[in-house]
Image: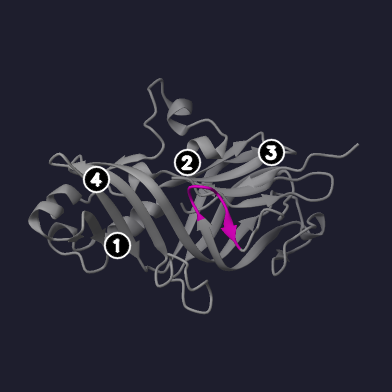
Amino acid sequence: MTAHIPTVRGLLLSSVALGLVACGGDGASLRFTSNARTAGTSNAWVQAAAETPPASNVFSSSDGTAFTLSEARIHLRDIRLDLPQGTKCGDVSGLVSGAECKGSDSSGTIQVPGPIVVDLMTGTTTPDLSGLRIPAGTYKRIDFRLEEAKAGEVGATEPLLGYSFLARADFTQDGAARKLELLFKFSEDARFESATGVEVPEGGSLVAFLKPQVWLEGLPLGECIRDGDVEVANGTVRVDDKAGGECGDAENTVKSNIKRSGDLRKSDEG
């Protein structure tokens, strides 16, 4: 009989899915995603309250301007995943090239070096990490570092070149259809965790889920567009480190929002 090995799904942020699959007789995979439909797991709003969850790709700025996410990508310097309590590095096998497990006789941390580009809409990564496997068990946190993607580390046509976070969305303002581009190059360590832990079964997945609904909190983007605080060209609104006025601190605001937008979930499907 062939045992099913869980997948750990995770990070940073519509859907980010990074797949790591468990090895040996037990295991799981890892994904980063911001798309509840892609994640294959129940939505946090459904779990926590009897209310209708928002559409997974729709989010708003603090002044109520609504956006529909069409693209989201992040660049990671590394990923670090603590093994379940009592699980040691000797229980891990099938790591992808460059990944390693460090720890003692009773604990361990899987470390996956970058550069890693994560497509948060499709869950795919460059390089492909879908073959990475981790032991099934209860996971409490995942750490990663966002960093600017530099020439020589990513392909010349990679949209993230020169940035660590990119998001594109569609919206309507004053009856006109427009597009939004968020482009930031912040460097920051981030952690998604669960106080009680997330129990991932064999053949399942650990999901690092990012909620885009949080990303623009504290940013009155509609007002900034009307006031000329952000660049607008050919119907596309660009928000980056050059934004001014009420959006002058947009990069730090979005960075903080991303860090608190995540939680750990599980899916029974790999």
Residue 220 visible in rendering: no
Task: Determine the residue positioned at 28% across, 53% down.
Answer: 180
Residue 75 lies, in percent from the top left, at 48, 64
Left or right: 116, with 158 as reference point: right
Label ID, residue 13: none
- Kindly identify the amino acid type of the residue bearing the numbered disc 4: Ser
Front position in the image: 128 or 264: 128
Which of the two discs, 1 and 3, labels the residue nearer the N terminus?
3
Structure colour scheme = one colour
Please rate how many residues cluster around mark 4, counting C-alpha atoms within 10 Å: few if below 14, some from 14 to 19, many from 20. Answer: some
- Label 2 belongs to which residue? 35
State how far apart marks 2 and 4 are (Cα): 18 Å
Work out which quarter of the rendered image holds the C terminus and state it: top right
Please tell me whether mark 2 sits on a helix, a strand or a loop: loop
Residue 72, horizontal then vertical, whole percent: 42, 53
Q: Decide which of tag 3 and tag 2 comes sooner along the chain.
A: 2
Amino acid at circle 3: Gly
Q: Secondary structure at mark 4?
A: loop
Asked if residue 122 is among those painted magenta in the image, a careful observer would answer yes
Q: Position of residue 103 (x, y in %)?
A: 72, 64
Is 176 on the left-hand or right-hand side of 10?
left
Task: Return the residue at label 3.
Answer: 204
**Vertical side of 218 occupied by 45: above or below:** above
Q: Which dot marks residue 252?
A: 1
Residue 230 image point, x, y percent: 17, 61
Residue 175 seen anywhere in this rendered image of the structure: yes
The numbered dot on residue 61 is: 4
Q: Earlier in the sequence, mark 2 or mark 1?
A: 2
- For the stretch drawn in magenta, the main secondary structure is loop
